[in-house]
Amino acid sequence: MDEIKKALTEADPFASWWPFILAGIVFVIGTVRTYMGGQPCPNGNTIPDRVIVVTGAAGGIGREVCRELTRRKAGCLVLACRTTEQGDTLRELLRREGTECTVEVLVLDLRSFDSVRRFVRQVQANHPTVDALVNCAGVIFQPGGRTVDGYEQHLQCNFLSHFLLTQLLLPQLARSQHGGRVVNVSAHGYTAAKIVDRADPLNLRQLTQSGRDAFAHSKLAIVLASKVLARKLKADGHRTTVNCCSPGLVRGTGHLRHSPIMKALFAKVLTFPWMWLFMKSPAQGAHTIIRLVTDPELASCSGDFFNDCERVEVSELAKDDELAERLYRATFSAVGLNENLEKEHTKGKKE
């Protein structure tokens, strides 16, 4: 007994306690990752026979949205991709996963309004009814000059082209027997946006914006315009809903490949562990989008902003209804639509 007591007294505490210390570290890391991953989609219902259009389908979040929608037995997915090669790769992935969902690949270049209109004509030719439109595509720190239509790239790719796409597909969405759903993907960064001149809500005269500022402004524009469209559709008695969401901070999407900081190898090595710990995976980033597309409890919810699958308040600037109306009218002009034709675009089944 004395020998045992002596051995315990002289023993190195770490020799016996290190498993507990290691377990504690693993527990903390796991807890942080679970918390940062956000709330999972609370519903698991299927959506058979529904036609869903997804932009940015080949990207990290968009790809996971498509995978989950096929698991939920969507009838047809229309993959809007910049190239057919990207779409074919995703279609093959979905086929290998055993999906019975019909998958169509159509080219959509958000840098061109002509491409948007061609895409819409193809969708209309194949699908008189569309049940949901997920505007998921987006860019940040995009290099290069302006688009072929003369607009700043973040503004057109993230907002203007999606606005045009939504307006042109409203008749198909209005025919959905389930009630059409538009899901516009914004970002937390919209809260940093600035509109210097209220007479220029699209910041068309701000020629020296940084990529970060342009990105934030485009995401604010999404929130403002979505509120107005939701209000107009509801006032006209249409069942189509329009909501925004933030997927959160998501790693593995390729969005940061043009970031000045991430161009340095040292920065990549230094930030990777922290990104792994504090940022969501693409699958986790897709949860809120999935809920907005599939949850029957949200069938009449419109004009709201969601984060981690729950409604949240928007910033004070995003609550400015007068500014939202200004931006909405300016956007109609920017994309080449006539506001007087808006009711024509929203024709369809009403309640």
Image (cartoon, rainbow, N blue to C red):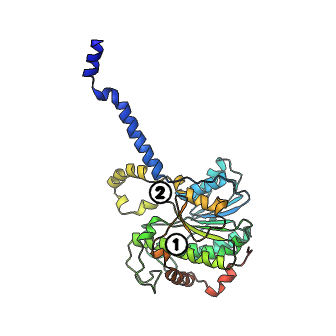
Residue 207 % position (x, y): 40, 80
Is residue 102 left or right of 268 when viewed as pictured? right
Q: Residues within 10 Å of mark 1 (few under 14, many from 20)?
A: many
Q: Residue at x 65, y 47 (%)?
A: 96
Tag 1: amino acid: Val
Q: In this orientation, does residue 345 appear?
A: yes
State whether residue 211 appears in this view. Answer: no
**C-alpha separation, residue under disc 2 versus residue under disc 1:** 20 Å
Q: Residue at x 38, y 33 (%)?
A: 20
Residue 259 in the image: state x and y as whole percent.
Answer: 39, 63
Quarter assignment of residue 348: bottom right
Q: Which residue is mark 1?
A: 223
Which quarter of the rendered picture does the N terminus lie within? Answer: top left
Query: Residue 103, how many percent across, how many down?
Result: 68, 58
Mark 2 crowdedness (10 Å alpha carbons): few <14, some 14-19, many ≥20: many
The label on residue 250 is 2
